[in-house]
Image (cartoon, rainbow, N blue to C red):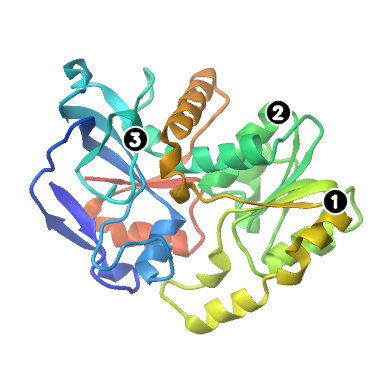
């Protein structure tokens, strides 16, 4: 099989394509012949050496794949061989062949190709946790989505509009026309506008989806109405280039509103602070599989509309990572073996 390895922390040029023997499925497992693998910001942070959940170097990243089952282990129905699936994996997704538990491989609906399928699991499940499980978006809610043109931002938009909410997004001006066509009600250019100043005179927010962190969280808390929730699902402010910067990390950590998120302050302000990290839900396999099945149903209904910005072969993984670092992508970037 072919894999993309990260031998050491560094910029995208460290990514290294290698050959390895195909894995064999064990009891209760299936092997997926991977046709497409999703790229996520966590992969970039792991490559930079600033992702705390990453295994020790060297390693293979990747949380989501799509393809077809080509082998099964003991206890798995052999009828699954040949079945088109999308699957979550705990690293290792940048591979042309991967073994996952039988439960983690979910049948792909008819008409859903592998590239589009690989664009759903991580961002779709993150948006589901943010909007459905924790954020509880309901009709009339005003929701601010940072990084609105990213994969999570677009998936969250679909869920917000499905529930009848108002979606406000932050993104660079070059992405506004696209986002307006997708359904965002209001857009803020984070490069030239301070989102707190832009929204200060308006009705308070019911929910904020923030993967940025640092001072962005502090500003968001000041914009919440009573009952409002700040949902944190990333810390991209510490990754302002394509390689690790201790100064950037320290500066971002120092700007986190630590004193504003203590229980007494939250109680007095009638605010909630939520946190989502899909990488910490591996012990909730049955629930996560159920959520993924729900997302695939929403795709079949036309509610969920994954957008694939670009597809790169494994040999051009460095270009895929750099595209995301440059904040030039809309939706998902996919790698193909």
Separation of residues labelled 2 and 1 (CA atoms): 23 Å
Instruction: Give the residue drawn at x 60%, y 80%.
Output: 251
> Which residue is disc 3 drawn over?
87
Q: Secondary structure at mark 2?
A: loop
Q: Please state which of the two labelled residues, at mark 1 or mark 3, is closer to the viewer.
A: 1
Density class for disc 3 (Cα within 10 Å; few <14, some 14-19, many ≥20) is: many
Quick check: can you spot residue 194? no
Separation of residues labelled 2 and 3 (CA atoms): 26 Å
Instruction: Give the residue drawn at x 75%, y 63%.
Output: 262
Quick check: can you spot residue 33? yes
Q: Secondary structure at mark 1?
A: loop
Q: Please state which of the two labelled residues, at mark 2 or mark 3, is closer to the viewer.
A: 3
The quadrant of the rendering that contains the C terminus is top left
> Which residue is disc 1 drawn over?
270
Q: Quadrant of residue 183?
A: top right
Separation of residues labelled 1 and 3 (CA atoms): 39 Å
List x then y, in percent, for residue 185.
Answer: 75, 40
Instruction: Give the residue drawn at x 38%, y 25%.
Output: 112
Q: Any mark on residue 163, and which?
A: 2
Relative to 241, 226 lies left or right = right
- Near-viewer residue (1 or 31): 31
- Near-viewer residue (16 or 177): 16
């Amino acid at each position: 099989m072919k894999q993309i390895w990260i031998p050491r922390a560094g910029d995208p040029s460290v990514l290294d394509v290698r050959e390895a023997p195909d894995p064999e499925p064990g009891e209760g497992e299936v092997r997926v012949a991977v046709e497409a693998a999703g790229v996520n910001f966590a992969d970039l942070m792991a490559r930079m050496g600033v992702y705390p959940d990453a295994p020790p170097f060297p390693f293979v990243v990747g949380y989501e794949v799509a393809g077809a089952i080509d082998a099964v282990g003991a206890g798995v129905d052999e009828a699954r061989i040949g079945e088109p699936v999308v699957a979550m994996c705990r690293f290792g997704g940048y591979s042309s062949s991967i073994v996952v538990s039988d439960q983690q491989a979910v049948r792909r609906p008819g008409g859903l190709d592998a590239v589009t399928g690989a664009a759903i699991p991580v961002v779709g499940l993150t948006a589901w946790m943010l909007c459905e499980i924790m954020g509880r978006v309901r009709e009339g809610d005003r929701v601010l989505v940072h990084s609105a043109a990213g994969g999570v931002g677009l998936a969250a938009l679909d869920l917000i509009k499905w529930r009848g909410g108002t979606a406000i997004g932050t993104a660079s001006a070059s992405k506004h026309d696209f986002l307006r066509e997708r359904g965002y009600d209001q857009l803020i250019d984070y490069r030239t506008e301070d989102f707190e100043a832009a929204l200060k005179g308006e009705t308070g927010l019911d929910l904020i989806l923030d993967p940025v962190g640092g001072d962005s969280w502090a500003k968001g808390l000041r914009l919440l109405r009573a009952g409002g929730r700040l949902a944190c699902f990333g810390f991209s402010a510490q990754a302002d280039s394509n390689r690790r910067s201790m100064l950037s990390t320290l500066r971002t950590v120092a700007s986190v509103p630590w004193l504003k998120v203590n229980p007494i302050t939250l109680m007095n302000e009638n605010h909630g602070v939520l946190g989502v990290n899909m990488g910490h839900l591996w012990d909730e396999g049955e629930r996560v599989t159920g959520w993924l099945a729900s997302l695939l149903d929403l795709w079949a209904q036309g509610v969920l509309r994954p957008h694939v910005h670009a597809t790169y072969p494994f040999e051009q993984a460095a270009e895929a990572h750099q595209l995301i670092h440059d904040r030039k992508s809309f939706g998902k970037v996919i790698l193909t073996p």
